[in-house]
Image: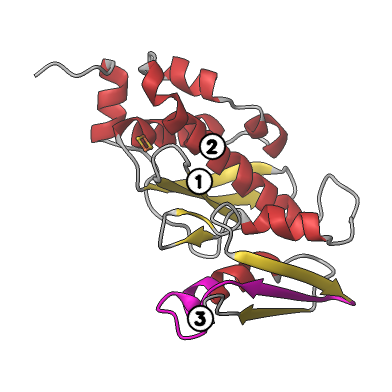
Amino acid sequence: MKFPYSEKVLEHFRNPRNVGQIENPDGKAVEGSPACGDMVAVYIKVDSKTQKIKDIKFESYGCASNIATGSIITELAKGKTLQEAKKINWKQASEALGGLPSIKVHCSVLAVEGLRAAIQDYEDRHGVVKKKEPTTEKVVRKRLRHVMNPLTGLDVVRTNLIKEINIEKGVVKIKVGLPPDHQFASNIKEEITEKIKPLWDVEEVNVLFVDESE
Ligand code: FES
């Protein structure tokens, strides 16, 4: 059987490097693709002195191209500083893999975005690079884009589940458009809290479920 993939893609697909999770990662992110509904998760450990990525792992719920790209970007990023790793783009990833079919570009973009988001997560948690900016609705919304809506495999912002965000004196209130007894309610609540709580000026996160159909 002839695959439309380079040898390198197939090799990384069959033997992906750095697969799995990291316990207590310094940064992590889950990215979903609007094109196909697939997901990729990236975990990093960072040396706080040198700002280098000392360990990186990924999990893919995507296709062969996504797995191969996840594998190659973890290889490219390992040992690099956060600033260097941020610059890794899909073109480099695709070149390192000997090319990807153009229909598969979104798959490599997804893995690259996962890496960037994991770095962003590290920076948000540790207040590096940027000055400590106060948490605004925009900041919260951006982070919520990394919380998946298990019903669709896309994030909760894009799928319109976030009905309201209110921030007052370190307390972030988020209204989610699902019945409180929904099978994924506690899971979504946990993930939202996990994303918002680490922000430096957030003391409390309240996630409320509002049943829109009532
Ligand atoms: Fe979904 Fe490739 S088709 S990640």
**Sequence-wise first label, 2 or 3:** 2
Q: Nearer the viewer, residue 166 or 4?
A: 166
Sequence-wise, the earlier of marks 1 and 2 is: 1
- On the image, which quarter does residue 127 sit in? bottom right
**Figure check: 7 above or below 17:** above
| Front disc: 1 or 3 | 3
Kindly state the secondary structure of the residue where label 2 is placed.
loop
- Considering only vertical position in the picture, is 134 above or below 65? below
Pointer 1 and pointer 2: residues touching (CB < 8 Å)?
A: yes
Nearest the eye: 13 or 107:
107
| Drawn side of residue 122 relative to residue 79, left or right | right
- Taking the image as shown, residue 153 lies to the left or right of residue 113, namely left
Magenta region includes residue 184? yes
Task: Residue at 89%, 61% (x, y): give it.
Answer: 134
Quarter residue 135 falls in: bottom right
Q: Which quadrant of the frame does ligand 1 lie within? A: top left
Colouring rule applied to residues: secondary structure
Tally the marks: 3
Q: CA distance from mark 1 to mark 3?
A: 37 Å
* Structural distance between the alpha carbons of marks 1 and 2: 6 Å
The residue identified by callout 2 is 78
Element marked by disc 3: loop
Residue under label 1:
56
Crowd around label 1: few <14 · some 14–19 · many ≥20 (10 Å): many
Which stretch is magenta? Answer: 169-188
Q: Position of residue 122 (x, y in %)?
A: 68, 53
Residue 178: where, in percent of width, then height? 52, 75
| Residue with the most extreme bottom position | 181
Residue at image coords 81%, 66%: 200
